[in-house]
Amino acid sequence: MSDELKHTSRRAFLKGGAAVMAGSVAGAATAQSADPLITEVQDWASFTGDGVDATPYGLPIEHEADVIRRNVPWLTADPISSINFTPIHALDGTITPQGCAFERHHSGAIELRKDDYRLMINGLVDRPLVFSYEDLERFPRENRVHFCECAANTGMEWAGAQLNGVQFTHGMIHNMEYSGVPLRALLEEAGLDTAGDLADKWVYVEGADASSNGRSIPMEKALDDCLVAFKANGEALRKEHGYPVRLVVPGWEGNLWVKWLRRIEVMDGPVESREETSKYTDVLADGVARKWTWVMDAKSVITSPSPQSPIKHGNGALVISGLAWSGHGRITRVDVSKDGGMTWETARLGSTQGDSKALTRFYLDTEWNGEDWLLQARAMDETGYVQPTKDQLREVRGENSIYHNNCIQTWHLKSNGEAENVEVS
Amino acid sequence: MSDELKHTSRRAFLKGGAAVMAGSVAGAATAQSADPLITEVQDWASFTGDGVDATPYGLPIEHEADVIRRNVPWLTADPISSINFTPIHALDGTITPQGCAFERHHSGAIELRKDDYRLMINGLVDRPLVFSYEDLERFPRENRVHFCECAANTGMEWAGAQLNGVQFTHGMIHNMEYSGVPLRALLEEAGLDTAGDLADKWVYVEGADASSNGRSIPMEKALDDCLVAFKANGEALRKEHGYPVRLVVPGWEGNLWVKWLRRIEVMDGPVESREETSKYTDVLADGVARKWTWVMDAKSVITSPSPQSPIKHGNGALVISGLAWSGHGRITRVDVSKDGGMTWETARLGSTQGDSKALTRFYLDTEWNGEDWLLQARAMDETGYVQPTKDQLREVRGENSIYHNNCIQTWHLKSNGEAENVEVS
């Protein structure tokens, strides 16, 4: 337990609790005096349950049926190219379970077998190679937790407050522990001289699905921290996450994290593929498009309270909770505002800072007594970068963009505990 | 990528690969020259897949149907009291997905609703309280990754090499990121003076299932790092893991991690309940039982190769992989022996050392050319403790024990790549 927390509740934390001890308990949402309720509580206990030997692989309990991936039907013309958003309004901590982790596919989630799987490395290498799945397992491997965020996350919000749920405004993200082989090791196996001059070299990576989703990655990044990954959160990648092998490109936009990875070609320049020209570039106000905007800049969002996670308890103690992340490294600080950015309080980072380029959970332990709040969070990362307001971002980028919207989000918290997606200027 | 790894594959890592380039590829399990295979690989690509909008909560792909919890049918008389083991032979990294995470229940996995849930704190406190689920969500919370190991893990191995699979010898363990409220905060809310003299005070914790699984915990531990947890790996606890609330007692035996937590009583001594007298004590050779043996001492095991995870590829590069953990803190070193403990090589720790009392993944990147090996791993923790051999452990504890067997495990790796559970003296 952190020292910071050790003394927060020396006083009665849920102030209502003490009042309740004196008499009435009906309807109180705060902790209640035990003695009048002991009989009721004793009755409630002492169930026997089912043996679970029949559930060799378990699923969430039926009462959590609401904690699922969801899509936005109008976002794509057909489910063959679709996006399924993480229910971040209902999660806590930092790890995303694979079962409800955001996934985006361009031509369906294809089904491969490990035995059939092959990864080719070709192009400007001394000896082009084809690796089987078993080959990959024979290389030294690493395990790292990283977030994967779609460049289009929050992309529907450029022109105004559009979607009333953090699952939809910010749910194109997940955070998992990946096990895999450094891409560097495989390139070296194919004879790439990583000690030589590779300044103008790129890799072109593509998947085995019909879209191929081909993308160019500068060699410096390919040799730095990319993983050819075959597990997420300890187990095999799910079909929709690229089984059996996907690329992990820490801190960079999710579209580069090619699923069902089938080929890596070393080239002396980028391909300028469809996915990095007509898509995944950022059209500015003057019509000029920014390209090669791979890094996901520092960003944060309050997940609770939020439109899908209203306050249901009474006045008093409230935990404001959210997520922060940066493609440039570690989050160093998150501030929370209750007045639309006029004043700020520094939040508490709620987990051990482990790997770089991973989700950070933050909390503000506060009180709420039915006030109208304009809730915002703003993240800072180890480079000193501060998450911008929407106006600041629009000033530089205009409103034509889809991608790389990392602006500060505002929720209007109302006296009834409900929250709404709004804009403030 | 670690510096250590950056230069391991400067030479051709899979030596067979180079040979294969010269001609024959049939049957070779190592990376193959790309050019003869390009046509085949191109055919294999370009599938379209299903849209996955119909899977709001995903499951593993059917090809991974073998990666499931399993039980040992003769271990308990009826599934109402059973143990389901993690398939650690098939996992990598450190996180265990909830779906296949070890679970033990004494009277079934009971089903509760959050709305019905109550947690009572009573006994020697100024104001006994009953908390609803919503009350718990209003306290400052923390997120930490911890392993949970049953005291009986490896318990069938005291008398000899018994079970031929690491899932069964060492699978009563999982490692998840827990989100919850420090128990200390709830005890303080109930008026416990944590600055006072609590040296002889205990808490008695019990669950809502018919077994109640009541256990006594000394106050020092209760106030140190215990969590009243409601999420694991970001999402709600699964039914079989104690939905909606379980106790997390980092580094201590799993039986104390009470599921469906319903009551915590502050007492001036331990209860000496069934679960801490007739069970969960360690009978020594002279018939005297050790009790209050809560901490899980440092332990490690090779998960691959192992009886359920034989070597299927050919000679040459081999990754030996395993898990290490200690209830006293962090793992500082793991050694691997190929000759039954006569000589040792230091393994590589394969992930960022985050939270204390969490699983650590280790690797030995080595070569195997069909030799007979007696594979062992031995863990060291930050206290300087070294995992003992089975003989060393028996010398002190005899062979009557069930619990707290943390001895070095031996796998006999044979020339055909298969491994067997054996003992060495």
Image: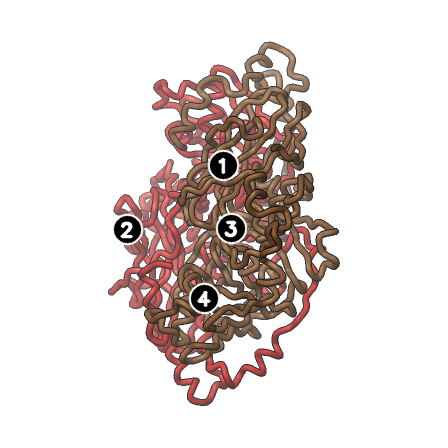
Chain colours: A brown, B red
Task: Single out the mark in the foreground, 1 or 4.
Answer: 1
Q: Which residue is mark 2?
A: B386
Q: Which residue is mark 3?
A: A296
Label located before the other in sequence (4 or 2): 4
Task: Single out the mark in the foreground, 3 or 4.
Answer: 3
**Disc 3 to disc 4, C-alpha distance:** 43 Å
Q: Tell me the residue at 37%/68% (across/down).
A: B412
Give, as a three-letter code, the residue at label 1: Phe
Are circles 1 and 3 on residues that touch, CB within 8 Å?
Answer: no
Give, as a three-letter code, the residue at label 3: Met
Q: Tell me the residue at 55%/53% (across/down).
A: B100
Identify the element where label 1 is drawn.
strand
**Disc 4 to disc 2, C-alpha distance:** 25 Å
Q: Nearer the viewer, residue A7 or A318?
A: A318
Q: Nearer the viewer, residue A341 or A20?
A: A341
Give the numbered dot on residue B307.
Answer: 4
Q: Position of residue B235 (x, y in %)?
A: 58, 43
Task: Single out the mark in the foreground, 1 or 3.
Answer: 3
Q: How dense is the environment of label 4, judged by Cα within 10 Å: few (below 14), some, or many (20 and up)?
A: many
Task: Single out the mark in the foreground, 2 or 1.
Answer: 1
Q: Kindly tell me whether residue A403 is visible in this rendering.
A: yes
Q: How dense is the environment of label 2, judged by Cα within 10 Å: few (below 14), some, or many (20 and up)?
A: some
| Chain containing the residue with disc 4 | B
| Chain containing the residue with disc 3 | A
- Residue B164 versus residue A392 in the image, above or below: below
Q: Position of residue A59 (x, y in %)?
A: 63, 49
Identify the element where label 4 is drawn.
loop
Query: Does mark 2 fall on the same chain as mark 4?
Result: yes
Q: Kindly tell me whether residue B106 is visible in this rendering.
A: no
**Disc 3 to disc 2, C-alpha distance:** 44 Å
Q: Which residue is mark 1?
A: A362
